[in-house]
Amino acid sequence: MAGFRAWAAKSPDGGTAWRDASRQGLTSLALPEEHGGAGLGYETACLALEALAEETGRSGLPFSLAAQMWACQEPIAAFGTSEQRARYLTPLLVGDAVGAFAATEYDAGSDLLSLKTTAAPAADGSWLLNGTKTFVTNGPMADVFVVLARTGEGSTLASLTAFLVPRGTTGFTVGKRIDKAALDGAELCSLELTDCRVPGEARLAGTGDGVAVLMHAMRYERAFILAPTIGLMARALKEGVQHARMREQFGRPLSSYDAIRQRVVRMHVSLTSARELLHATARAADAGTLDHQRSSLTKLHVSTEFNRFCTELPDLYGGYSVLAETGALRLVADAVASRYYSGTSDMQTKIIAEGLGL
């Protein structure tokens, strides 16, 4: 698994944080035992991601792990053959490999059904993939990519196919790391596919089943990709309360002023509301009743409350919010980003509205 090894050799901690999280079982918590998972369910997995984010205070690692868990592992477990699961899923679960989901394109954005990457069948049963992908989370160090490509004309619902493409495949180029202002520690990049040849058995599910793979991945990613933000908010609230107690102005602690107390309470309400809905959604997934409307509702609500929380946070610190040690502005950037990945807030609203019959 050259991608993860090469990245780990250059990372500050040698990739130990990723390996430790995986080998302690985080990435396997939600998957059933028959697929090599712990079978402990989605609520347990969300709690673990929250705890990791709260402990570290950083968004990048838990976000990257979550992206692999929901958009790469879930589709392989659900649609993969026994051979595909043995080759790819098992190494992902134990921290020996990293996975990525490659769907977004420059001109498609949230409209994933408009993607232009193509896959054409060859006489020998292989497929030739051509196109570009962008904003591929984990791309710089991933060993296997779930790639969506158009394999037919007409209705998009029957013309997309998912492929498992290992790093190093001829014609498959991993682009440079994308610089960004949020999700510190997460690695994103673009991909180029130029006559990238993969065997017929690289298809994940059948030809034309790509929408089913995509919808499965999005159902879990949209529901749970923001689980780490609950831990980030919890840590920020705890540190904010401590600051309000210790910092004095005009001879009184900040915590004695109603304006500050009200601000902290509003932050607490946002955290509690986001946490309660997320956990209820996880329980629905554990019960087998998670649908797309519920996933979008969770993504929209948690990102909205995260942004409300971060509207209050800088004013709690005042001018000190610009100091890196408070983490306030870093969290604001993470909150803004949460409105856009895994489908924008407008996209989630559209899905919810359609579910309501509008």
Image (tube, rainbow, N blue to C red):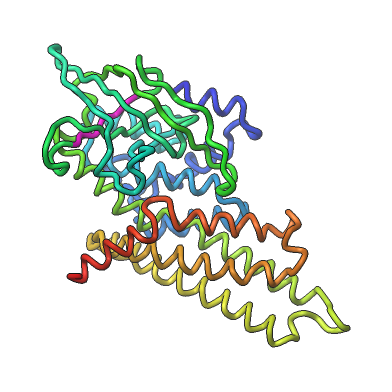
Q: Residue at x 23, y 42 (%)?
A: 213
Can I make out residue 175 in this image?
yes
| Above or below for 293 versus 183 | below
Q: Is residue 293 magenta?
A: no
Question: Quadrant of residue 314 in the image?
Answer: bottom right
Side of 297 relative to 355 (left or right)? right
Q: Residue at x 33, y 42 (%)?
A: 108
Question: Quadrant of residue 296 in the image?
Answer: bottom left
Q: Position of residue 253 (x, y in %)?
A: 80, 81
| Above or below for 175 versus 39 | above
Q: Residue at x 32, y 27 (%)?
A: 131
| Above or below for 229 versus 135 | below
Region rendered in magenta: 160-165
Q: Position of residue 59 (x, y in %)?
A: 56, 51
Can I make out residue 101 in this image?
no
Q: Position of residue 245 (x, y in %)?
A: 76, 77
Marker count (numbered): 0
Image quadrant in which the C terminus is located: bottom left
Considering the whole magenta stretch, tell me its main secondary structure: strand
Q: Position of residue 37 (x, y in %)?
A: 34, 44
Q: Front-most of 263 and 57? A: 263
Q: Residue at x 33, y 51 (%)?
A: 39
As drawn, the residue found furthest toward the front would be: 107
Question: Quadrant of residue 9 in the image?
Answer: top right
Q: Front-most of 139 and 339? A: 339
